[in-house]
Image: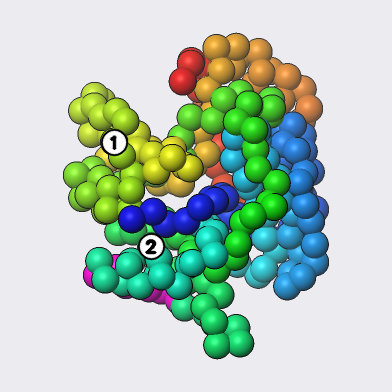
Amino acid sequence: MKLGDVVQIAIGVPDLAASAAFYETLGFEKLAENDQPWPWKQYSDGQNLILLNQDGNQYIGLNYLSADAAERVKQVEALGVELLMKQAFDGRLHMAIFADADGLMVGLINHDPTGMPLPDGLPLSHCGKFGEFALGVANFQRAARFWQQFGFAQLYASSDPYPWGIFSDGLMMLGLHQTDEFQGPCPTYFAPDMPKRIEQLQAKGLTITDGVLKAPGGETLLLFTGEV
């Protein structure tokens, strides 16, 4: 099964203005904003949708949108996955949330994505090209089995320097890394001229240490030299 028709990286931030300024400094494009049901802004790096929510919680996860989310939620439950939350409005499912064994939260939202602004796939931020939504996992094989049941195909796997792999459902690139070097999830970017890009971002007042960039909302972005 697939989790939805459109996916966006959802980030709960304590200060929307500070987080918005951060992503705009990175060259992310603002697509939409509103203050209902709480203040939020939607951005894109050219490849992904990024939703910043000032909803009173701090998190980073994935939101899948579809007009038939209720049916997809039934399929998730049939697989034995426990829902952390299920919310309905006017007798209809609005959103359901579950998490994998390593804590990555996924929201299934009942919303027809037709007409939503979608990235054209060309990187536009100063960070370079998006490579993966990287997640540190306790057991690579267990994590791989979990995500494969939701249509994530393994594109690459290696045991060096630890078990890890790249998986995609056609909408999101998910990196599973059996390591305690980081927890994540971390949006990860690559560029052959990353050292120069980092210097330029540092000149704009951002602090980047060993390719690690901390956002005001608490999330971590990883910047690597290379091609993907």
- Type of amino acid under label 2: Ala
| Residue at x 64% of width, y 33% of height | 120
Residue numbers of the magenta segment: 80-85
Secondary structure, mark 2, is strand
Q: Residue 209: x and y, percent?
A: 57, 28
Q: What residue did someone put label 2 on?
A: 99
User: Seen in the image, is 184 located left or right of residue 212?
Assistant: left
Q: What residue did someone put label 1 on?
A: 154
Q: How crowded is mark 2: few (under 14 residues within 10 Å), some or many (20 or more)?
A: some
User: Seen in the image, is 45 located left or right of residue 171?
Assistant: right
Q: Is residue 202 above or below residue 142?
A: above
Q: Residue 136: x and y, percent?
A: 35, 44
| Residue at x 58% of width, y 55% of height | 10
User: Seen in the image, is 26 located left or right of residue 50?
Assistant: right
Q: Residue 37: x and y, percent?
A: 73, 73
Secondary structure, mark 1, is strand
Q: Residue 98: x and y, percent?
A: 40, 66
- Type of amino acid under label 1: Gln
Which dot, 2 or 1, sits closer to the camera? 1
Q: Which of 63 and 224 is in front in this view?
A: 63
Whether residue 138 appears in this view of the structure is no
CA–CA distance in space, label 2 to label 1: 20 Å
- Lower position in the chain sequence, tag 2 or tag 1: 2
Q: Residues within 10 Å of mark 1 (few under 14, many from 20)?
A: some
